[in-house]
Image: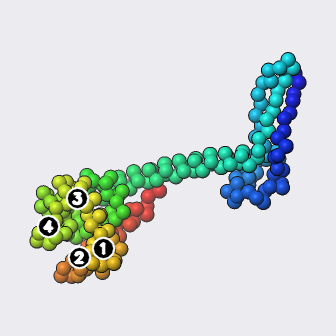
Amino acid sequence: MDVLQVIRPKIKPLKASYDKLSQWHKLIILLLITSFISLAVPHQTLAEEKTDSASGLVFMIGDHETFISELSVEVKQKFAEAQLQKELDQKRQLTLKLEKYLNAYNSPLADVASTLVNLKNWKKVVALAAAESSFCRKYPVGTANCWGVGGSELWNFGTNLHEGVIAMDKFLETHPKRSNVKYSKMSFENMNGLYKQPAAEHWLANNEAVYKDLVAIENNIE
């Protein structure tokens, strides 16, 4: 069987065009070399049956830059998938640990742990609930507001704690209205006397203690 080789004349040698490659492409080359994958002939070779009477093979040698580009896309995709899986696993671990922590205080917030861990300010939401209503054990259920927002005229945060924690997270991001620094960015010390009126040392201590517990839980996730 005859073998015919068709080479595209415009292909640049890898050595001559290496300096023109992007940093990502160069990294791919180095990774392949260190993995004992030879790129001595950095071309993509495709073989297809020649249908003429010679019944030979025609080898199409592709551009090495195209080969590297396709490989880099695959590497990026696999890395993104691995990162996503890792984040999902960590989120599941965090949900279970938070649920266990809240159950230890007989807190109804344990039932919405999966919602909490997806909120930007979840640790502050839980800490404030601990200080204001003993982890949402004591509050007007019809308001879904166990953070004391509104004082004597509590704001309505929804019909259940799932809606309540989401509303509280939003409240921390948007209030105080007339302040450039919102509660989400304030320390509990700065909130004491503003969010909590009048200021109270035990309120500050309770918030900081619970927040510290939650940070420890989050940091122990593998």
- CA gap, disc 2 and disc 3: 18 Å
Report if the CB atoms under discs 2 and 3 are less than 8 Å apart. no
User: What is the tally of numbered marks visible in this picture?
Assistant: 4
Mark nearer the N terminus (2 vs 3): 3
Q: Which residue occupies 76% across, 51% down?
A: 33
Q: Residues within 10 Å of mark 3 (few under 14, many from 20)?
A: many
Q: Which residue occupies 35% across, 74% down?
A: 185
Mark nearer the N terminus (2 vs 4): 4
**Secondary structure at numbered mark 3:** helix
Is any part of residue 195 visible from this angle?
yes
- Near-viewer residue (174 or 108): 174
Please give the residue where the numbered disc 1 appears in the rendered image: 183
Is any part of residue 106 visible from this angle?
no
**Secondary structure at numbered mark 4:** loop
Mark nearer the N terminus (4 vs 3): 4
Q: Report the side of 59 relative to 210 (left or right).
A: right
- CA gap, disc 2 and disc 4: 14 Å
**Secondary structure at numbered mark 1:** helix
Please give the residue where the numbered disc 3 appears in the rendered image: 164
Please give the residue where the numbered disc 2 appears in the rendered image: 195
Mark nearer the N terminus (2 vs 1): 1
The disc at residue 154 is 4
Name the amino acid, label 3. Answer: Gly
Mark nearer the N terminus (1 vs 3): 3
